Image (cartoon, rainbow, N blue to C red):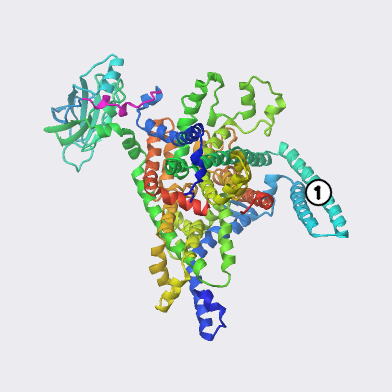
Amino acid sequence: MTTTLARARPTKGQRRRRIREALEAYLFLSPATILLFVFGILPVGYAFYISLHRWRIQKGPFIGLENYFRLLGPPVNIAMVVGGIGLLIGAYYVWRGLFAQSGGWRLALRIALLGMLIIGGLTLVLGADGMLTYAAQERTVRQYLLSVLRTVFYSSGTVPFQLIFAFLLANLLFQQIRGRSFFRMLYFLTYITPTVATAAVWRATVFEPRQGLLNSLLSALGMAQENLPRWIMDPEGVVPFLAQWLHISLPDWVVRSPVLSGPSLAMVAVCIYNIWVFTGYNTVIYLAGLGAIPYELYEAAEIDGAGRWQLLRYVTLPLVSPTTYFLTLMGIIGTFKAVNHIYIMTQIVGLGGPQDTTTTAAIYIFKQFREGNRWGVASAAAFILLGIILLLTWIQNRVAEERVHYG
Amino acid sequence: MAEHAPARRRFRLRPARIFTYAVLVLGAIIAVIPFVWMVLTSLKTYGEYALRDPWPKALTLVPYRDLPPSEDVVVDLQPVEEGTWGGAPRSAQPLLEGRILIERVTAPVAEQLARAGESPPLEVLILAADVEEEVEGYDTFYLTVGSRVIQQETVRVRLGETWKAPYYLNAPDMERWGPQLTVIDNDPDHFVVRKSWRPGVMLIFNYIKSWYEADFARYTWNSVRLTLITVVGVIVFSTLAAYAFARMNFPGRDALFTVFLATLMLPEVVTLIPNFAIVIQLDRFFEDVLHIENAWLNNWTALTIPFMASTFSIFLLRQFFAQIPDELYDAALIDGCGHLRFLLQVVLPLSKAPLMSVIVLNGIWSWNAFLWPLIVTSDETWRPITVGLSKFTMEAAAEVHLMMAGAAITIIPILILYFFTQKQFTEGIATTGLKG
């Protein structure tokens, strides 16, 4: 096409044609670009603008970073946490720079690295400590930080399990078996059906405390009637629940700590549902990843005497690592933005309930926006969330550079 | 993808084979069991659900065995004595009253009656009242079953209306298994009620009930329209954009493409609030400047237009368009063909498979969209089925059998689409892998 024309020295006619083509291209692109700008990019700036105002449905006065302080506490702590993270990121680049440099620079860089690590680490720890101390007294800050903690529970309670199950299923499906496309179709079913409907089905049939599938299974396995979890309606932490079941007595400070008592049983229910929905999707992507591995590699490894386990460990696992990386990132971002199924599953106990134990960061934003009508606070919370997502993406990218093999 | 699996698997031992199938089948069961449970529950009556009957009676032959044929009964109506019917409306014409006997009932109803120590025949009392002046004859009928008439719940029925057969205290499932009573002639001198037993209605009774209770007809129609509009928009806009990215040279192409891809990372909660604010502003602008009321809020525009710039679809199509050989374009160029004609006449006919993926996937996402429609709709005019269902699951939280029927109504269109096009689904997702 035009690349062949571009190589020759442009005559007047060719230049006019190129300009025409560019104009035509912009015309082709304009509808999608305008829409993407209005509903995809402009909103990010607009969200920041809203977050700087007192904004309750109607725009109020400009209040600077007040909304952020309301969510995270005094500016000193925020500055220390952000600065500490910044220093640690800087330390990473200095450490990378160490390999490129030689001689006298190396020593200076090493000292700088050490200094940045110590100062960055200390600032981060002290800032976080200050933030947590403040959160103990201030309700709004506590609620927001707890919602972030619950998001962490949510991500760590779903993404690894989804990946392991999907990897297992994909490897089994990848063999020469009968009905592969039939199984693939069934697994993918959970992903394409409307969340609103399946979440309602899970709420009413699987997690129903009295006659739900899960509790029927548990009582069939011999769990006493009074020990049965009430799932969506149960705000109890999973650690105290398991301890009670296994007859271990926990010290009081473990039960009361929001971190050590773990996600609530309601949150566990949300996680189980999430795993059910996304395992099939992950399996399909893993299958594509497995299909991209050249067969010769397996042959070569087998000639070298590799066993089944070694093939998996040294050929399959490294070569699907780009898929794993992609699915991890998508899974984590997915848990950060999940609202729909939590909305449906908890609508009978109050959104984000019981006792706010399924209020993840996304639900917190949604509640501030819909129930509190505090658009400014909600946008500030959304922006902090975006910052966390960017930081996580950055960390994952760095890990990926070290560990992911792009064949 | 993955079509030639390693041949070494041929030498696998049998136990490994069995293990493989066992795990795959277990996974399939876990994937499917909530759907199976949904369908089973949606066919139960409330009593069956509450008593934990695992298998709904509707799926056995019991209710349908020897059903009597439909029968038109002429009812002898007599004037009602003053004061017999407490709360009935008064009008110029006197209230009339008559009786129908139901000699035969279906097995589930007979069972319920026996449990309460009663047996057929059941007596149905009819009260005819005239409340709408312009209508000829009697237009409103109150049907009551049972001997203790006044204490029973009465159901108001209009001419020609079915399913709302009367409710009987000792046989609550009468509404479902008992005869459907339809007033087919409302002339007081020749008053006719049709007794009919319809197995189809008995089987999918919960579906019919929730369809009417939650106004699913409107929501389904809304969702169908919204999905079609979105998909058409996505196809037009993404094809144009993907073609420009894949086959045209212009300054800033790679930068713009990076910007497009970057938007995939943005979580919906970040853009939700500003997008809502933008839609409100647009709505106000259209009202003030163009004098169009509700151009965006509660309208199809806000529900479809923001989804038409589908980065995912652009990415998917671009991958495919870039593979089309340059020679084809050069040949077309000699024939005096421009980019638009080349796109329409050569590229699109070659790209049926990826276009199908784009249609199917965007159709699904549009049908399943929930959060945004929930926010931008405040009345029923354009509210999609997901929002309608979420309202229904809240209202019918205690009536799980109806709730499951509602969920099934929402899922069934997607299932039908999926079973016919599942290859496009999995391959569209697998080749691009985008969108979590």
Is residue B77 in the magenta section?
A: no
Q: Is residue B43 left or right of residue B435?
A: left
User: What residue is drawn where x is 43% and y is 60%?
Assistant: B235
Which of the image's four quarters has the C terminus of chain A?
bottom right
For this orientation, the residue located farthest to the bottom is A12
Identify the residue position indicated by label 1 in the image: A117
Q: Secondary structure at mark 1?
A: helix
Q: Is residue B301 left or right of residue A318?
A: left
Residue toward you, B129 or B217: B217
User: What residue is drawn where x is 42% and y is 49%?
Assistant: B423
For this orientation, the residue located farthest to the top is B117
Query: Magenta residues?
Result: B52-65
- What is the crowding at mark 1: few (fewer than 14 residues within 10 Å), some, or many (at least 20)? some
Q: Is residue B159 left or right of residue B221?
A: left
Query: In the rendering, at what x and y percent does residue B48 appear?
Result: 37, 24
Reply above or below: B159 against A242.
Answer: below
The kind of residue on which mark 1 rests is Leu
Given the image, what chain letter belongs to the residue carrying mark 1? A
User: What residue is drawn where x is 45% and y is 48%?
Assistant: B378
Residue A293 shows in the view: no
The number of discs equals 1
Residue toward you, A104 or B9: B9
Is residue B58 in the magenta section?
A: yes
Residue toward you, B52 or B391: B52
Residue B45 placement: quadrant: top left
Residue toward you, A176 or B294: A176
Residue A314 shows in the view: yes
Query: In the rendering, at what x and y percent does residue B50 appear?
Result: 40, 24
Query: In the rendering, at what x and y percent does residue A338 appear?
Result: 55, 44
Reply above or below: A216 against B327.
Answer: above
Residue A161 placement: quadrant: top right
